[in-house]
Image (spheres, rainbow, N blue to C red):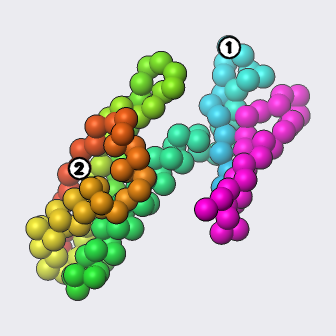
């Protein structure tokens, strides 16, 4: 797996802190920093997600992918899956995630709660590389709802 991240460089009177990532699969992802009112030349322009937001989003995508795949392989009629992630970060550098809460909402026809609980546990404990890595610094908790389609 590979990725090339490039600074987008000067934009107008300020340099900004925008970056573009080109993934090994040929996709492009923009990232930017938060504006810095005290030191504008060091801040971003708020044109794209923050790098840590993309890490959080990637973790959500990784675990949701697992949950859907596990449920489909179990021949459950899953029709939707969302996961809302909330993260707390350390106050000092490196500002790693210290707590991560994931709430899944799975929609389907007759999908048993036990199957959803098992799929989330398998993703969290075995398959989702991103959450396993983040679990080295963050306490991760999960919860879920199952909605009938």
**Residue 41 in the image: above or below residue 51:** above
| Residue 25 shown left or right of residue 133 in the figure | right
Tag on residue 142? Answer: 2
User: x%, y% of residue 67?
Assistant: 30, 67
Q: How many numbered marks are there?
A: 2
Q: Quadrant of residue 127?
A: bottom left
**Residue occupying image coordinates x 67% and y 18%:** 37
Q: Quadrant of residue 44?
A: top right
Q: Residue furthest toward the top?
A: 38
Q: Residue furthest toward the bottom?
A: 75
User: x%, y% of residue 83?
Assistant: 34, 56
**Residue occupying image coordinates x 87% and y 36%:** 10
- State yes or no: residue 27 in magenta: yes
Q: Please give the residue where the numbered disc 1 appears in the rendered image.
A: 38
Q: Nearer the viewer, residue 38 or 88?
A: 88
Magenta residues (range)? 1-28
Q: Nearer the viewer, residue 67 or 137?
A: 137
Confirm whether residue 131 shows in the render.
yes
**Residue 94 in the image: above or below residue 141:** above
- Mark 2 Cα shell of 10 Å, populated few (<14), some (14-19), many (≥20): some
- Mark 1 Cα shell of 10 Å, populated few (<14), some (14-19), many (≥20): few
User: Is tag 1's residue or tag 2's residue first in the polypeptide sequence?
Assistant: 1
| Residue 33 shown left or right of residue 63 in the figure | right
SS state under label 1: loop
SS state under label 2: strand
- Magenta span: chief secondary structure: loop
Q: Quadrant of the N terminus?
A: bottom right
User: x%, y% of residue 6?
Assistant: 77, 46
């Amino acid at each position: 797996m590979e990725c090339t991240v490039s600074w987008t460089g000067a934009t107008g009177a300020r340099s900004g802190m925008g970056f573009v990532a080109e993934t090994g699969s040929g996709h492009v992802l923009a990232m930017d920093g938060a504006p810095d009112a005290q030191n504008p030349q060091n801040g971003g322009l708020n044109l794209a997600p923050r790098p840590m937001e993309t890490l959080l989003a990637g973790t959500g995508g990784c675990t949701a992918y697992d949950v859907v795949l596990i449920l489909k392989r179990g021949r459950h009629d899953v029709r939707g899956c969302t996961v809302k992630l909330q993260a707390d970060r350390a106050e000092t550098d490196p500002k790693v995630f210290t707590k991560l809460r994931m709430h899944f909402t799975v929609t389907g026809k007759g999908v048993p709660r036990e199957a959803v609980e098992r799929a989330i546990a398998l993703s969290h404990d075995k398959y989702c590389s991103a959450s396993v890595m983040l679990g080295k610094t963050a306490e991760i908790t999960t919860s879920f709802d199952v909605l009938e389609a």
